[in-house]
Structures are given as structure tokens and as C-alpha cells.
Image: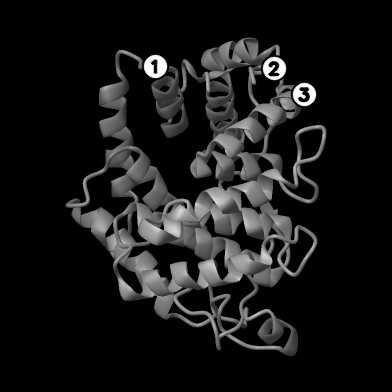
Amino acid sequence: MSAPAGTLDAIEQLRLYFAPLETRQGLLARQALGQPGPRDDELRRTLVGGMVADIRPDGSVAGGVVATIWRAHELLDLGCSMAEAAFGRLLGWMMDLQRRRGSFSQGCTAARHSYRACEHFLSGFFSPGPPEQRVAPLMLPCGKVFRAEPAARFAVSCLALRAALRAGFSARQQIEQHTTSLVQLQTHWSDWQGYFAPDLIVAGVHALASATGSHRRIVPQLGLGIVSNQAEDGTWSNADLFHTIDSLLAVGSQDAKEAVRRAVPALLARQRADGGFGATAQQERSLIALRALIWAEQEG
């Protein structure tokens, strides 16, 4: 299956869009295109230095829980050394969220218990704040907004789990507990209209895509669950397009690739004249789109 017509033109628009940007997204986009800028090595060092300098003595950054967790992802993307003391503080602050009140796994109701989605079955989740503090609506860096309180807490925890797994913490007991809990929950994810909303399924699959060993081996099948719910126009009902595509990119299977190819027309329809994709999370969504288009264009 070849990429839809217009894919190369869209990639070229994105190349022009990212070419002058001295941002993490700009650097990663040029890397994905195989066209690094002459100053990108220096830019990488500058970006890492600025991001590290923003880390407070307690390990957090301005903007709260999501901003701090996302900073871990940003530094990992830019190849920041794990030996960097400030980065270690940030990861320590993030990991401490597993010991705080207010995680998705805490509490129990009759409905949650029936789905084994409560503290009697789950553990290891990260908390974005105490239970009495409302955290929704909450927007992930990809632009997806979670408006329901339990959904926002679940999504933040999956974002943190991805960072912890990427940082090499898979063997830690609480990380293993969180990963195992997601594996248990995925038995409910085959029903796109069930207890777990589609965007929560997408977040959970994306987190497991960073796992290793036996947990990682189930990811292609989980990706197939997302793929099977794709609409004829390439989108997903009740799921954010960029959030979903980003998850499929992480899944990386052939089925996921074909689904991304089918989603290309929907991406092309959303591309603006400047090459970007609107004001919401503009650079991040544009980077997701670029990676998707490049992947769709590749043979196989």
C-alpha cells in the first residue's frame, strides 16, 4: 500500500515550516527528515542547557505536573545525560508522584470494582494532585484535552510511565506494578464504546509501547485494537487524531503503519497554508504529522 497523493507535498511544506525553528521540535523534525541544520549540534546543547537550568531545586519546573513530566520527555528526546544532576532531580520528583494521594488507581466504587479499575486491583499509578484538587480539564503536550477528572488522572499517569520506561526504570517495583496494571486493564480495551473512552485506550497503549519484555510483546495486538476502530475517512470516533497517530507511531507494527497511511488524507485536510496544523500545540502536532507522513511514505 503506497502513501496517498499529496504526501510528499505535505512533507515539503513541513520541511519549510520547521527549517528556521530553533526549538526541540524544529531540531527533531530536521533529524527525521535527514536534513540537520549546520547549527543543530550547538542548538541541541543550548536547548538542553536551558531546559536543565529551568529545573527547580525540588526537581519540578514551572507549569506543574504535566510540564515537569514533559520536560523529562524533552530531555530524553535531546539525549540529555542521565548523569546530569538536575535531570536526576527532575526524575526523582516525577517518581515521587507514585507515592502521593490522588492517583487514578486510588479509591473504589461499585462500577470501578466491577471493571477491576480500582485500588483493589491496580497500583503504581502517578498522582497529578491530591483527590480534593481538581486537575481537569488537562491538556497533554500533543494537544489532547481530557475534561473528565478520572480520565485526566489516568492520562497523566500514562505520560509519566512513558517517561519512566524511557529513562530505564522498568525494573523498579512501582513501575512494574503500573505496567502490569495497564496490562490487566487492557482486557477491557477491545470495546471502543466501553468503560474506557477511546482516548484513554490510546494513552494506555502508548505507555505500554515503551515497555520491555513480555509487556512489550502484547503491544502489536493492542495496536490492532486501535486500528480496527478506524473510520473510513481515516479518523477515529471520539479520539483525537494526533493523539492516536502518535500512539500508533510508538506501536510501530505493520498494521499501525497501514492505519497511519489511511489517516494521511485526514492529516492533509488539516494542514494550514504555513505547513502547520493550527494554534493548538502547533509545533508538537506538526512534528507528529511529519513523522506520520514520513512513515507512510516509506516502503513496506
Q: By what rule are the colours in the image chosen?
A: one colour
Asked if residue 22 can be seen in this view, the reply is no
Q: Secondary structure under badge 1? A: loop
Q: How far apart, in angstroms, are the residues tagged by discs 2 and 1?
A: 22 Å
Q: Earlier in the sequence, mark 2 or mark 1?
A: 2
Residue 143 in which image quadrant: top right
Q: Secondary structure under badge 2? A: loop
Three-letter code, disc 1:
Gly
Asked if residue 203 can be seen in this view, the reply is yes
Instruction: Determine whether label 3 and label 2 are within 8 Å by CB.
Output: no
Residue located at (69% from left, 61% from top): 137
Q: For the residue carrying disc 2, how many other residues have a C-alpha within 10 Å: few (<14), some (14-19), or many (20+)?
A: some
Q: For the residue carrying disc 1, how many other residues have a C-alpha within 10 Å: few (<14), some (14-19), or many (20+)?
A: few
Instruction: Determine whether label 2 and label 1 are within 8 Å by CB.
Output: no
Q: Which residue is mark 3?
A: 269
Q: Is residue 109 above or below residue 188?
A: below
Q: Is residue 293 above or below residue 177?
A: above
Q: How far apart, in angstroms, are the residues tagged by discs 3 and 1?
A: 25 Å
Residue located at (30% from left, 30% from top): 44
Horizontal and vertical percent position of residue 239: 73, 49
Residue located at (56% from left, 55% from top): 205
Q: Which residue is mark 2?
A: 4
